[in-house]
Amino acid sequence: MSRQITKMKNRSGLAPGTLLHIGSQKTTDTDISSFNYNLDVLQETALNSEKDIMPFFSSDTVSWINITGLHDVELFSKLGDLLKIHPLILEDILDTSQKPKMDIYEKHLFILLKMISWDNIAKSIKFEQVSFLIFDNCLISFQEIKGDVFDKVRQRLRNKNSRIRRLGVDYLLYSLLDAIVDNYFLLLFNLGEEIENMEDSLINTPEKDILANIYSTKRDILALRKSTWHLRPVITNLYQDDFKIITPEVSRFLKDLQDNTSQVIDTIETYRENISGLVDIHLSNTNNRMNQIMKVLTIFAAIFIPLTFVAGVYGMNFKYMPELSQKWAYTVWWLVSILITASMLIFFKKKKWL
C-alpha cells in the first residue's frame, strides 16, 4: 500500500492521461493470448506483440484477446496508438487502485472491476484488477497476473455446441463477468467458514492473536464491499442502457447477473455485521475474564483481612499480653484463623460468589 501511495504521489502534477503503472509488479513478462472463434472455427494463439492484435479487428469472427501484466507502460502506449484508445482508459488500466467503473466511448466500451479469490494458505482475500475493452467483434481483457477464474469459459469456447460459440462478443463479456461473480460466491463460502472458526475460537479457546485476525478479516470485508458495491451499477447500466454492442438476448442474462451481484452484496453486509459482532464478543470475553480475576483476588483479600488483623494484634510488642503466656495460645490462634477462613468461604459459597 505504501509503494502504491508513493507512485500515486509521483503522478501528482502530471497531465491527465499520462501513463504510469500504479501497483505492485506481479509478473516479469507480459503475455498476449487470443481466442478467435465462431460456430465452426476456433483458434487459440499466443501473440508476440501488440501488432499481432490488429488482424482480429478485420475478421468476421469473435475474438477474445487477453493481456497479462500491466507493468509494461511502453506496450500500452503502442497499443493505445494502434487501437485509438483514449489515454484516460489506458491510465485507468494501469492504475490498480481503481474501483469498478464503466466508460462509454464512440467505438468501444470500457469496464473495470476486481477479480477476487481466496488464499487458503494465508486465510485472506486476494484482489486483482481486471479491465475489459469491448469492440464490435473483439474483447480485450487486461490482468495483473497469470491464473484467473476464466478456465470454464475457455472450456465452453472449446465446445462447439456451447451457446458462447454461436453468440457475439456481448455474450463473451457476460460469460467473463459471470465467471468473476460466481467466484465471489466461492470466496464468500470460504470467508463464512473462517468467520465461524473465529467465532468458535472466541467462545471456546481464544487465541492470543485472534483480535488481529478479526481486524484483518474486517479490512478484507470492507475492501470486498467496496469492490462489489460499485460493480452493481456497472452491470445495471449494461442491460438498461441502449448499447449497440449489447443485444436484447444478452441483456436478460445481464439482469440475472445483476441479481447475483445483489445477493453477493447482501451476504457481504451480513458478514460485516458478524465480524463487528466478533469484536464485541472478544471485548466482552476480555471483560469477563478480567472480572473473574478481580473476583478471585477480592476473595483472597477479603479472607486475609481478618487474618491480618489478628496477626497484627498479636504481633504487637506489649509485655503484658495475657494470651502470650498461655500454653495453647499458638494452637488456639491457628484454630481461630482456620475458623475465620472456613466461615468466610462458607459465606461466599452461600452467596454464590465461588
Image (spheres, rainbow, N blue to C red):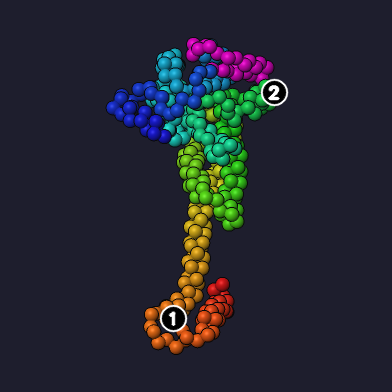
Q: Is residue 76 left or right of residue 122?
A: left
Of the pair 334 and 251, the residue shown nearer to us: 334
- The residue tagged 2 is 159
Residue drawn at (52%, 54%) of the image = 278
Kind of element beneath mark 2: loop
**Residue 210 sits above or below residue 128 on the image:** below
| Residue type at tag 2 | Asn
Instruction: Give the image location of residue 354, x and y in percent.
Output: 56, 72
Residue drawn at (65%, 17%) of the image = 42
Q: Single out the mark in the foreground, 1 or 2.
A: 1
Q: Is residue 162 magenta?
A: no
Quarter of image, res 35? top right
- The residue tagged 1 is 314
Q: Is residue 221 left or right of residue 17?
A: right
Q: Which residues are magenta?
A: 32-52
Of the pair 69 and 252, the residue shown nearer to us: 69
How many numbered markers are drawn?
Answer: 2
Residue drawn at (58%, 40%) of the image = 187
